[in-house]
Amino acid sequence: MVKTLSELKGYNIVGKHSAVKTCLWLKKSLKDEGVCYKEKFYGIKSHRCLQISPALRCNLSCIHCWRPLSLMPEIDGWDDPQFIVEESIKAQQRLLSGFWGTKGVNTKKLEEAYKPNQVAISLIGEPTLYPFIAELVDEFNSREMTTFVVTNGTNPNAVDRLEPYQLYISLTAYSESSHKTLNKPHGNLWDKINRSLEIMSEKDCRTVLRLTLIKGINMNVERFAGLINKANPDFIEAKAYMHLGHSRYRLERSAMPEHDEIRDFAEKLEKLADYRIVDESEISRVVLLERK
């Protein structure tokens, strides 16, 4: 019997096409065992972060993706943004209810977690495939929640409409040919990604270009220089591919760079582009660079 997404991976399905999942770092934060690098870098609180997807579908089949994309359900009609916001918060609260009485849990943090003030729209799938993604972000914003949206950049019209607190574009490819090999797109999408990078350079919100780095495949700094110049983000995250989940069926563990290798990449990037290293998280194998 084939298991569903929620049965296999602990996702809490919301409505027709959305999902919520408590991440590892929220759980660690509740026990005072550490926080997500996003708290370290950007000041959000891991235990008050709501991790969601408004679109359980994707238009890429990236070789490095750890998510179980084959288990995503068919979508028949779209829920409205207010419904997704309200039901996602309820889903988070249901997931948190199991922490009461758990040894080592900081009950003050757990109480605060029931009122999330940060949302990471990045759980699974491509969020901009939800046709009302801009309205969803606005709804979260109206509730005084900070909004981090992570997109693959394949839907520039949606990127243009978005006004989150922080906009990420996640890149693994550095050219059209590498895009076809590494991202395995469902259609011709490289030009659209480049257009989204141009749009990023014009955004008023905080912008981040995340470079997912795979050892032996895309760790040549010079290859990304043109794309960085095009996007002109406030920050760059040089982030190691992590040998987790379903990616293990496509890549060897040796494809996961060590933190020292990520740091070396970032130092080379400092010399090549107008950015400087400002922080890092060794456990997450990520280095943060800020535009000078």
Image: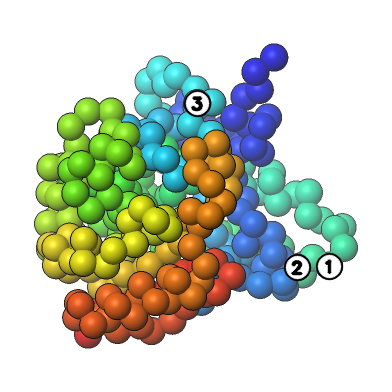
Q: Are marks 1 and 3 in contact (CB under 8 Å)?
A: no
Q: Quadrant of the N terminus?
A: top right
- Asked whether the residues under the numbered discs 1 and 2 touch, taking CB atoms below 8 Å apart as contact, a structural biologist would say yes
Q: Quick check: 182 left or right of 66?
A: left
The first of marks 2 and 3 along the sequence is: 2
Q: Which residue is mark 1?
A: 104
Disc 3 secondary structure class: helix
Horizontal placement of 205 versus 137: left or right?
left
- Regarding residue 137, the answer to whether it shows in the image is yes
Residue 187 % position (x, y) = 22, 28
Name the N-terminal-most of marks 1 and 3. 3
**SS of the residue under disc 1:** loop
x then y, percent, for residue 239? 43, 64
Label 1: few (<14), some (14–19) or many (≥20) C-alpha neighbours in 10 Å? few
Q: Which residue is mark 2?
A: 31
Please tell me which residue is depicted at 28% across the width and 28% down the height of the picture: 186
**Amino acid on which disc 1 is placed:** Gly
Camera-side residue of 275 and 53: 275
Left or right, 166 with reference to 101: left
x, y percent for residue 28: 69, 64
| Lower sequence index among marks 1 and 2 | 2
CA gap, disc 2 and disc 3: 33 Å
Residue identified by numbered label 3: 70
Residue 189 x %, y %:
19, 37
